[in-house]
Image (cartoon, grey):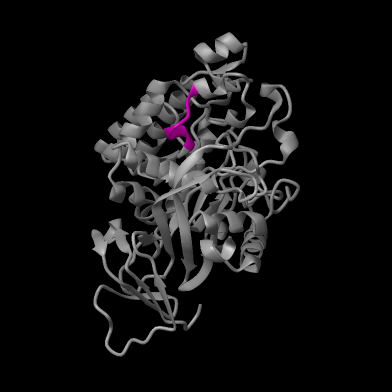
Amino acid sequence: MTGERIVISSGRVVDPASNLDGVMPLYLADGKVLAVGARPEGFESDLEIAVPGEIVCPGFIDLSVRMREPGQEHKATFASETAAAIAAGVTTACCPPDTRPVIDTPAVVNLVQGLAKRTGTIQVLPIGALTRALNGRDLSEMSALKVAGCVAVSNALMPVTNTLVLRRALEYAASYDLLVMIRPEDPWLRDAGCAHEGAVATRLGLPGIPETAETVALAQTLALVEHIGVRTHFGPLSCARAVEMIALARRRGLPVSADVTAHHLHLSEGDVDGFNAYCHVTPPLRAAGDRDALRAGVARGEIVAICSDHQPHEADAKLNAFPLTEPGISSLETLLPLTLRLVDGGILELARALACLTAAPAALLKLETGVLRPGAPADICIFDPDRVWTVNREEWRSRGHNTPFWGQALKGRVTHTLVQGRLVFSLVQAA
């Protein structure tokens, strides 16, 4: 934390959690928001950041960011991926438990927290393993994981052996009011699939993943959630029917929520054509109708959050026959512009789009961040909504170059990022 006193002037402050939207100054002191609008009596700034024409909002909270460290440093490290995060306006990132070793003991939680502290930039929140070593059979010590600092538990990409184990895991998590994060996918219906079971996969001869792999797993877990009452978050969703199921569950009062990746809101199965391994993701890119339903679900508030599901890979991971390539997109640095594209397209209001990146994930995780009210941590993103930039390797900060957006012109660029009142990124200084 810093004692520096900062005023951010001339920017349009948009804070969905406080229903703020207008040009006004923002005053920071001792790592916290001091005031919004009126200048505090006797305030003298050490630094003024003038940002006319730019948006000032809470720092983004990303529900799924793989740093690849510990255990897969050949793909990426905390240093490289936190650098990408601050350039993307992300000030808080959730780290899934499928590190090596798995985040299933307090010792590994402490290891991850230590790696994050070493970079000295963003806040990294560990997600604990639902089962030991993600084996799907033996429950982890969730109470100890919560005490150590885990904000949720998940089995990441690994299946749980059977519904009885899943029930016991949900009951254990509920007894400690732990959020359970579920990636809904039936491993038997998925089988060896690598793309959406549809026209494109059929034409290319790729083994398909039916949407029922998602909806069957979702229905099973929703039934258990209704019985147990545990707070459960599903994501990322990929199909229209899953959106409908989540919407119905929420209307019935179940304590459930869901997210979607920014790339699932723009790409579809057609982008896999030509065996484009950069578009090999899990869950798969589905039909255009599914993509449109995901967009509508975000607009209606049925899907509450947009995440990057950032998965950096080394170059070799994408250099093979499509089914043999590793799924995942390096997606931190495209999170904001892809979200803003929905605003430009009239699909989302700006405040709604930013809520999906700030207030909503903060509420899910019960964080003090995600808001600019006085007393809140001064985690802030400032971006130019009209700045057009081209996705290129020279300016790319993540070690993972596996993005399908190379060479594309995107609109919207982060110019400053502050974490606890400390300026950790400036586009001018980084240039």
**Does any portion of residue 38 appear in the rendered image?**
yes
Is residue 171 shown to the viewer in this render?
no
Q: In screen coordinates, is 190 left or right of 413?
A: right
Quadrant in the picture for the C terminus? bottom right
Q: Name the foreground residue: 124 vs 427.
A: 427
Q: Residue at x 45, y 24 (%)?
A: 216
Examine the image and state in which quarter residue 204 appears.
top right
Q: Position of residue 56 (x, y in %)?
A: 36, 62
Magenta segment, which residues? Answer: 263-269
Residue 224 vertical placement versus 215 (above, below):
below
Residue pictured at 44% horizontal, 20% vertical? 287
Specify the quadrant of the image occupied by residue 109. Answer: bottom right
Q: Where on the picture, by quarter, is residue 119?
A: bottom right
Picture coordinates of residue 391 (x, y %)?
Answer: 56, 43
Q: Nearer the viewer, residue 260 or 219?
A: 260
Q: Nearer the viewer, residue 19 or 97?
A: 19
- Image coordinates for residue 26, horizontal then vertical, percent: 33, 72
Residue 74, compared with residue 269, is above or below; it is: below
Residue found at x 63% / y 42%? 134
Residue 330, given in percent of the width and then of the height, sits at: 59, 42
> In the figure, is residue 322 to the left or right of 44?
right
**Going by the image, does 256 lie left or right of 67?**
left
Against 424, residue 193 (above or below) is above
- Residue 264 forms part of the magenta stretch: yes
Is 216 a magenta residue? no
Q: Is residue 195 above or below residue 333?
A: above
